Image (spheres, rainbow, N blue to C red):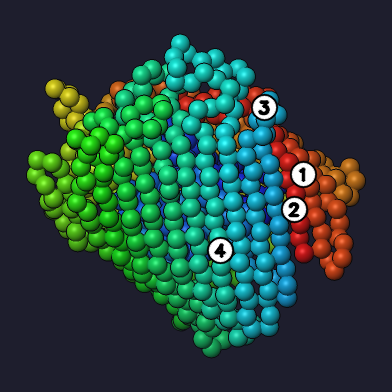
Amino acid sequence: LQSASDDVVTKDEIWDFNANTLDQAVKLIPGVIGTLDSNGRRNEHDILIRGFGRWQAPISIDGIRIYLPADNRLDFNRFLTQDLAQIQVQKGYVSVLDGPGGMGGAINLVTRKPTKSFEGEFQSGAFFDNHAAYSGWNGYAMVGTRQDDYYLQASGSYLDRDHWRLSDDFRPAASAIEDGARRNGSANRDWRINVKAGFTPNDTDEYSLSYTSQSGSKWAPLNVYNDPPDPPNSFWRWPWWDVDSLYWLSNTRIGDHAYLKTRLFYNTFDNALYAYDDQTYTTQSRNGRFRSIYADEGYGGSVEFGMPWLSRNTLKAALHYRTDKHTERNYNRPTDPAASSVEPLQRSREHTASLALENTYHAAADVDLVLGLSYDKNDLRLAQEFDAATGLFEYPTGGSNAVNAQGAIHWRYTEAAKLHASISSRTRFPTLFERFSTRFGNALPNPSLDPERSTNYELGWEGSPRPDTNLSAAVFYNDVQDIIQTVVVTTAPTQITQTQNVGNGEFYGLELAADSQLGDKWRIGANYSWLKRKIVDPLQPDFKPVGTPTHQAFVFVSYRPIDSLTIIPSLEFADARWSDVTGGAYRRTGEYTMVDLQLQYSGGQFGNGSSWQAAIGGSNLLDENFELAHGFPEPGRSFYAKLKLMF
């Protein structure tokens, strides 16, 4: 809760608010919200930064972007948080030095590094539903060492949820899709490991090699209002959702003031989606049932160089390049011996590059002027598809390019306060899914899609009127052009859609944040966001922007009646948002007021500087019955207990 425009969630806050996954942790940041994907069918959680989602706000781990070349449908509920030192979120203004895609914001997950000659940490917790039934557990373990000129670390996280339970206020419809109590299809399992080795020959230089692997599997709960499901092909499971990343990072000081940073990476993404016949999830014999297998890889790197030049100027330049390859294959009707078929492998390949310059002019001791410019290029080299009538064929290929520009001024008018103003015009390229997906035969491809663009304006203030008190405020306006929308092109004999650049819009709002330590016993924090989104689509006059409330707020109090005991109640509020409804309609849903509580006891140090903490708590203690996507109610009241050992 440090700044309204560039925020950090720390590992201590992740523990204090029991934020086990990334979409849960972002509630600590104004203007950012974790939400269920608007139609809910894929059981995916998105993060919206001032209204911009996973396609406009890239996510990175230690500065290495995680990108899925087919559709970039990242599920942020799959990203565990226990091994993170920080979650960094940029809003509106993302430096061109960070590479392409930062149209509306960016998220960077900073993994932990050892700080002592020998250290370790162990966490374990158990979950319970609102009837006190065991519903799952999670765990984390880390061991590492930091020596004079090197460090080593290994860590692992695990989360296994058997189920979660609906609110007792939920009343099932007259259907067999969902009968209440334990939510059907709510199980999931995720784990992540991280191994790193670093070489630090002096105080300024660092060279590291890291490997991160995460794996997940999940079910997909069904819409509680439809029996039979609409669409009928809704009995889905993801048996694996795996991301691996091997990356090299370096930072070298050149002389007294220049530096050189390099990044090299190799990422893979393996994913499977199984579509079943019915709620037994045993057969895949009906028309349209399948096993869809993705196998993707991406590799590339970046170089950044910075140095002072002229008088009172610092110039930085960055070059980014990556190649992404996508491979997919469908096993159609695999349990029907007479009708089963296996499609040939379908491949795609694209190359993305960016060249960026950024100059900081130190106009005065307390004033900096930053100007940035970049050129991004996306080159699609191969895009294959298969259908039974045509066989394997190739779509037209080609490329897109874009020029990005931005500027910002920072004025530190006192030692305890500063103002900033910025303008940033950034783009993002369409995904393969947007260009070529036929949506199970219900859509037309559009290979000539252009990039989206947003010009973001912001005015912000940060101040500390007293020690241990931080306040911030920001107002922003985003002018969005060439929004990529799905539009209906024919309605008879069946509805056919296509993805087109038809929308223009404006997102604007206000963000406030406060955090204050009041003596030794009390800490109080709060944030509030007001957001309006207007999108004009001439082909869809009734179009509604989905997923974001107008008002959202988060308030917490931390009270230590004695040194070893901390009581942390918190309240989260959001008003209604638009959600997709089958058939192209929209419905307002999602208003909630959630009360959480954590009681934690710190056992102090024992034996050679070791210490421990234990906590119990509850989420949604009022047992609110609400939906973030129409037909997909959220978990009711739940409880947990957890333990942390540090040595």
Q: Amino acid at mark 1?
A: Ala
Q: Does residue 446 lie above or below 304 as drawn?
A: above
Q: Residue at x 62, y 39 (%)?
A: 136
Tell me the residue at 20%/42% (across/down): 341
Q: Earlier in the sequence, mark 3 or mark 1?
A: 3
Pointer 3 residue = 130
Q: Secondary structure at mark 2?
A: strand
Residue in the picture at 49% in, 60% down: 213
> Does any portion of residue 522 appear in the rendered image?
no
Secondary element type, mark 4? strand
Q: CA distance from mark 1 to mark 2?
A: 9 Å
Q: Which residue is mark 4?
A: 194
Dot 4: within a 10 Å radius of its alpha carbon, few (fewer than 14), some, or many (20 or more) residues? many
Residue, disc 1? 615
Q: Mark 3 falls on what kind of element?
A: loop
Q: Residues within 10 Å of mark 2 (few under 14, many from 20)?
A: some
The C terminus lies in which quarter of the figure?
Answer: bottom right
Which residue in the rendered view is the most extreme toward the bottom? 255
